[in-house]
Image (cartoon, rainbow, N blue to C red):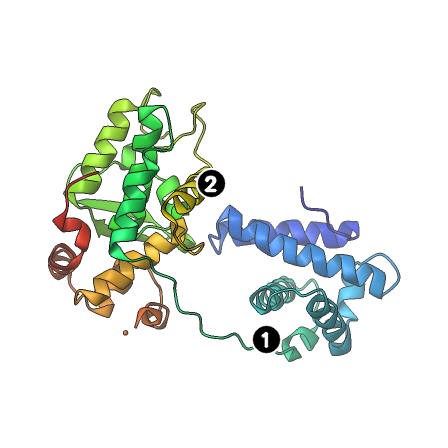
């Protein structure tokens, strides 16, 4: 439970904002919680800064200097610039929502500059390291079905370019019957990705060994007690693999998605194809990996991805 140092009227406005993020913006629960934590940190600071309860009137009266004081405080705590930037974005979003709902009007937040962030380059694993990590993760469990599960998840990340959240949100009804998989990504946007035979085989092996019934609407990937799999479980298993193989600490589940894109690009995949496979809304996001019709999408994928040339682990 996230605590907000806010009055009843402001708490009601926050509830409306969170509901709007979920229903209108189609933000994920993870994103909404991140925004809520940012706002909670701001309100906690402001309660002390203004010397009293923070209500709608108090927010409406804030000056640019008040926002700068908060950013200075956060900066002195050693908060990463990326987190500072996200915090500013959260505040702008919240205040804009309040203005649209005619709850308050305060343009002061728009005067705050976002910290300039260095353009990060995604960390990719080498092809042989990625493949060895996928093989090795199957050795970290005594239960064969758990080994098959972890292999299947990592193959979806490296073989299809899925985000960990996208893979773990799949249901049993999403198991591909053909050569493509429907993925629901950020903002509830759907995309279709080709599925290599090695990925289909891994999914089939996992489902065959999984002791829990494959109800169509149930989570495809589950933990030892049959509950939806927590991403932290995969992260812990991969840390164990990382130590065993002597891999860099950047070898994470998300690094496998980065590797998917980087290796496709290195093998001649074009940027537009990779953008579509990754589900990036903007080409500029995909350009960090350097820089289509459906038939061409599948053709390029099968011709260039290294997993297409090896057998299942």
Q: Is residue 215 visible?
A: no
In percent of width and height, residue 123 lies at: 38, 62
The front one of 69 and 137 is 137
Describe the element under mark 2 as helix, strand or loop: helix
In percent of width and height, residue 235 lies at: 45, 43
What label does residue 114 carry, if any? 1
Residue 98 vertical placement versus 225 (above, below): below
The front one of 5 and 135 is 135
The residue located at (48%, 49%) in the rendering is 28
In percent of width and height, residue 161 lies at: 29, 53
Task: Give the mark nearer the N terminus: 1 vs 2.
Answer: 1
In screen coordinates, is 207 left or right of 36? left
Q: Residues within 10 Å of mark 2 (few under 14, many from 20)?
A: few
Check contact, mark 1 vs mark 2: CB within 8 A: no
Residue 239 vertical placement versus 120 (above, below): above
Q: According to the image, label 2 marks what residue? A: 236
The residue located at (52%, 53%) in the rendering is 31
For the C terminus, the image quarter is top left
Give the CA separation, mark 1 to mark 2: 34 Å
In screen coordinates, is 282 left or right of 102? left
């Amino acid at each position: 439970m996230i605590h907000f140092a806010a009055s009843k009227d402001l708490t009601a406005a926050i509830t409306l904002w969170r509901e709007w993020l979920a229903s209108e913006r189609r933000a994920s629960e993870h994103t909404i919680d991140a925004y809520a934590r940012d706002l909670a940190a701001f309100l906690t600071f402001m309660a002390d800064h203004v010397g009293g309860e923070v209500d709608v009137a108090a927010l409406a009266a804030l000056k640019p200097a008040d926002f700068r004081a908060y950013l200075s405080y956060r900066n002195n705590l050693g908060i990463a610039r990326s987190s500072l930037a996200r915090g500013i974005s959260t505040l702008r979003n919240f205040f804009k929502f309040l203005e649209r709902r005619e709850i308050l009007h305060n343009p002061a937040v728009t005067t705050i500059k976002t910290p300039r962030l260095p353009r990060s380059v995604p960390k990719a694993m080498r092809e042989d390291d990625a493949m060895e990590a996928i093989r090795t993760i199957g050795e970290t469990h005594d239960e064969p079905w758990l080994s098959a599960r972890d292999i299947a998840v990592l193959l979806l990340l490296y073989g299809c370019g899925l985000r960990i959240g996208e893979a773990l949100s799949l249901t049993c009804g999403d198991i591909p019957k053909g050569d493509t998989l429907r993925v629901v990504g950020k903002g509830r946007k759907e995309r279709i990705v080709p599925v290599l035979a090695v990925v289909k085989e891994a999914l089939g092996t996992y489902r065959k060994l999984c002791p829990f019934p494959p109800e169509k609407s149930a989570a495809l990937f589950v933990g030892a007690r049959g509950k939806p799999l927590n991403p932290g479980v995969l992260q812990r298993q991969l840390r164990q693999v990382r130590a065993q193989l002597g891999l860099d600490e950047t070898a994470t589940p998300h690094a496998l998605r980065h590797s998917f894109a980087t290796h496709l690009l290195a093998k001649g995949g074009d940027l537009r194809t990779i953008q579509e496979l990754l589900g990036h809304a903007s080409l500029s996001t995909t350009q960090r990996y350097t820089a289509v019709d459906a038939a061409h999408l599948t053709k390029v994928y099968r011709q260039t991805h290294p997993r297409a040339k090896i057998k299942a682990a």
